[in-house]
Image: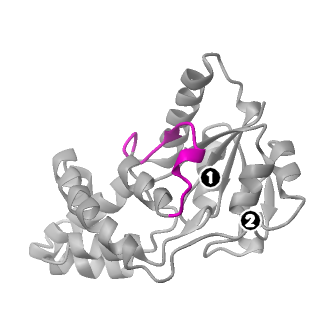
């Protein structure tokens, strides 16, 4: 039985910028954090790491004696949780007002075609944020478990958490070869490989097919909207 760990943003759904707007509302009172957010490329970043860098930017803006990285290393879990709490308060409103939200082409058809697989999540979104984003598109109930940005700050650790939860869900040990990660960024590929897993990369986000090939993905798809996609995901293996 194949176990598929899915990324969310750019892989399953496009939120139409809802997440970015919610983060903007969460830090709107802090010029330093707002400016940092405007410069960030969020694809592939985890929610906790985004919040850490926003907290660091806020402090750096007030007193730029140390580097941003030095300040970021001292940001506390409580400070990160405060930003993410404000983000969640804004996220539902942002999703409901998002005109560009969509479940990406081929997602539903692929999940249906892979009915013999177990589907989980491997996402940088904190769990509650993931739930809201997927419920908005009617997808949340399709996933049995997940590794989330609330489990860890770094993507490889998130995937390892998803692996442990898969074992708890199935009540047995799971070999690395039974798992496949599906994501849309080079960071998804790097995290999967660091965790010892294969990765199918799909060019449905910012990154093009050639970029994903260069990142070392074990298979690359232009989108999920092709009849051969389920077979490629079932058969994916580390090179």
Tell me the crowding category of disc 1: few under 14, some 14 to 19, or many 20 or more residues within 10 angstroms, Cα based.
some
Q: Position of residue 95 (x, y in %)?
A: 39, 71
Q: Position of residue 148 (x, y in %)?
A: 45, 45
Q: Residue at x 58, y 32 (%)?
A: 163
Q: Is residue 233 above or below residue 54?
A: above
Q: Position of residue 199 (x, y in %)?
A: 71, 50
Is 222 contained in the magenta span?
no
Q: Quadrant of residue 42?
A: bottom left
**Of residues 136 and 80, the one drawn nearer to the viewer in this rendering:** 136
Q: Quadrant of residue 21?
A: bottom left
Between the C-alphas of marks 1 and 2, the distance is: 24 Å
Residue 42 is left or right of residue 11, and the answer is left
Disc assigned to residue 106: 2
Residue 114 is left or right of residue 149, and the answer is right
Residue carrying label 1: 190
Marks 1 & 2, CB-CB < 8 Å contact: no
Q: Residue at x 76, y 72 (%)?
A: 209
State whether residue 150 appears in this view: yes
Q: Residue at x 57, y 37 (%)?
A: 144
State whether residue 69 appears in this view: no
Residue 105 is left or right of residue 38, and the answer is right
Circle 1: element type: helix
In this picture, which residue range is highlighted in magenta?
137-152
Q: Main secondary structure of the magenta part?
A: loop
């Amino acid at each position: 039985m194949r176990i598929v760990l899915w990324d969310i943003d750019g892989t399953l759904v496009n939120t139409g910028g809802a997440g970015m707007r919610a983060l903007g509302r969460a830090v709107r009172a802090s010029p330093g954090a707002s400016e940092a957010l405007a410069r960030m490329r969020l694809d592939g970043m985890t929610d906790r790491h985004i919040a850490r860098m926003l907290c660091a930017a806020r402090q750096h803006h007030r007193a730029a004696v140390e580097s941003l990285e030095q300040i970021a290393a001292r940001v506390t879990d409580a400070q990160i949780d405060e930003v993410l709490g404000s983000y969640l308060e804004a996220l539902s409103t942002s999703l409901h007002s998002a005109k560009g939200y969509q479940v990406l082409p081929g997602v539903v058809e692929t999940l249906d075609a892979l009915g013999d697989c177990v589907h989980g999540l491997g996402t940088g979104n904190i769990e509650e944020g993931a739930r809201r984003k997927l419920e908005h598109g009617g997808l949340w109930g399709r996933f049995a478990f997940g590794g989330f940005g609330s489990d860890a700050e770094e993507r490889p650790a998130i995937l390892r958490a998803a692996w442990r939860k898969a074992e708890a869900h199935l009540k047995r040990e799971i070999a690395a070869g039974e798992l496949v990660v599906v994501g849309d960024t080079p960071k998804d590929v790097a995290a999967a490989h660091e965790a010892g897993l294969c990765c199918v990369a799909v060019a449905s986000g910012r990154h093009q097919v050639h970029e994903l090939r260069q990142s070392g993905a074990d298979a690359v798809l232009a989108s999920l909207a092709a009849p051969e996609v389920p077979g490629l995901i079932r058969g994916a293996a580390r090179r």
